């Protein structure tokens, strides 16, 4: 009898399941990767690599609670598994458990994995994302020490140097990375922006011209390239050569998926209430998980999706409804260093801009900050408006919105 396509394949080993899931993960097909991992775990429930794979797939989808469970299970099976330790450390940072995170990262060094460049970069990025730049630089430099010919590792050092205010060093380091790999678009975009900030406009344009629209993941670099082309080449706004860049701007500014927004809200809610009783928390997560599954299934049917979202809106104000109802109310945000800002969304962003560089426009300030966060992390913050910028910054862990 021929096996159904959805049935587990008993002829695959746990390593083969892990390899298949890893390939899907690298293509950002996280749902498919999870399906493969679940199939593998049904046959090999004690396979540490499969639990670790689930953890990273969940982490990539910002599903921190589920990711933590997967890494905990992996570490129960193998307390010295380096990838599980790195993933658990990243989750400790997400939940504010800094000492536990540093201990997990340090354990990878004590176990002898300092020469694993990919692991060192992974840990460095996790620290970078949460604002521990000095510590991130240490791990990036460990990566370079064992892979001096890695453009990616060298560039990560440059990103950290920039965040520490060492722009001259960052420029030199990024040039070194590009000398290793001239096709490294992310590093070239970053370098071009640093040169622009330093007032080296001709050098900045020369670097921007060597990028493609697909190299850019935020608006700032594209705006600056277009501005420099217009000022030096006398191009009109509707010049044909600018069309690919306008199209890329449109792609970057697309509206987020409604289900993705809801997932982000669920994870934020869980993290805020992480200290509650474990049983009660688990019950809430299962209920919310059922809701998300239902919404995801209904998304293929327009009318059903509309009804599900309408029901959710009736029981919990959506971000858009909340904004309409409280348009006149003041808001308050608190930064990592304890400083707080109050006012309308626009007033808060303006105050943040003034605290850093009042010479910039608000739009440029948001774009600059979004690029800085993107740097070595790949996390994108919307700059379509003040509220979107602040909510994206909160999701990235840069601040907290208290009201």
Image: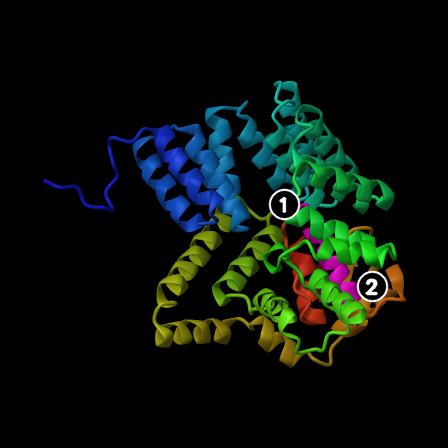
Instruction: Locate the C terminus and report the quarter of the image it occupies.
Output: bottom right
Residue in the picture at 84% in, 64% down: 353
Q: Where does the magenta region start and end?
A: 363-376
Residue in the picture at 41% in, 76% down: 306
Residue in the picture at 48% in, 63% down: 259
Q: How far separated are the C-alphas under marks 2 and 1?
A: 35 Å
For label 1, the crowd category at 10 Å Cα-Cα, with few meaning under 14, some 14 to 19 and many 20 or more, is some
The percent position of residue 77, horizontal first and vertical second, equals 46, 25
Marker disc for residue 352: 2
Single out the mark in the foreground, 2 or 1.
1
Residue situated in front as seen by the camera: 259 or 157 = 157
Magenta stretch, main secondary structure class = helix
Going from N to C along the chain, the mark reached first, 2 or 1, is 1
| In the rendered image, the vertical position of residue 183 relative to residue 290, given as above or below | above
Residue situated in front as seen by the camera: 270 or 54 = 54
Marker disc for residue 106: none
Instruction: Name the residue that disc number 1 marks.
Output: 183
Quadrant of residue 141 within the rendered picture? top right
Secondary structure beneath dot 1 equals loop
The percent position of residue 379, horizontal first and vertical second, equals 63, 53
The percent position of residue 160, horizontal first and vertical second, equals 76, 41
């Amino acid at each position: 009898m021929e096996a159904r396509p959805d049935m587990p394949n008993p002829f695959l080993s746990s390593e083969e399941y892990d390899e298949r899931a890893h390939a899907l993960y690298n293509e950002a097909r996280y749902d498919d990767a999870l399906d493969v991992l679940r199939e593998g775990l049904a046959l090999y429930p004690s396979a540490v690599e499969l639990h670790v794979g689930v953890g990273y797939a969940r982490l990539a989808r910002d599903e921190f609670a589920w990711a933590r469970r997967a890494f905990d299970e992996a570490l129960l099976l193998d307390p010295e598994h380096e990838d599980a330790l790195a993933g658990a450390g990243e989750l400790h940072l997400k939940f504010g458990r800094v000492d536990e995170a540093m201990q997990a990262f340090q354990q990878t060094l004590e176990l002898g994995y300092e020469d694993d460049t990919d692991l060192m970069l992974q840990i460095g990025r996790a620290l970078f994302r949460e604002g521990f730049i000095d510590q991130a630089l240490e791990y990036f430099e460990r990566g370079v020490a064992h892979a001096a010919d890695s453009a990616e590792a060298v560039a990560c050092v440059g990103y950290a140097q920039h965040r520490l205010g060492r722009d001259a060093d960052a420029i030199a380091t990024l040039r070194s990375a590009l000398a290793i790999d001239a096709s490294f678009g992310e590093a070239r975009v970053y370098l071009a922006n640093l040169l622009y900030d330093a007032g080296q406009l001709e050098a900045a344009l020369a670097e921007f011209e060597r990028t493609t629209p697909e190299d850019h993941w935020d608006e700032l670099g594209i705006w600056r390239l277009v501005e420099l082309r217009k000022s030096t080449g006398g191009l009109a706004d509707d010049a044909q050569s600018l069309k690919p860049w306008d199209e890329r701007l449109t792609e970057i500014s697309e509206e987020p998926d409604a289900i993705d927004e809801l997932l982000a809200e669920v994870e934020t809610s869980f993290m805020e209430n992480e200290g509650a009783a474990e049983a009660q928390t688990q019950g809430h997560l299962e209920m919310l998980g059922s809701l998300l599954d239902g919404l995801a299934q209904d998304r293929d049917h327009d009318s059903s999706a509309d009804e599900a979202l309408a029901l959710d809106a009736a029981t919990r104000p959506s971000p858009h409804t909340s904004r309409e109802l409280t348009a006149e109310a003041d808001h308050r945000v608190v930064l990592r260093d304890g400083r707080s800002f109050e006012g309308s969304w626009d007033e808060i962003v303006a105050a943040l801009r003034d605290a850093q560089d009042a010479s910039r426009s608000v739009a440029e300030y948001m774009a600059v900050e979004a690029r800085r966060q993107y740097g070595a992390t790949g996390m994108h913050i919307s700059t379509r408006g003040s509220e979107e910028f602040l909510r994206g910054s909160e999701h990235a862990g840069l601040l907290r919105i208290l009201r």
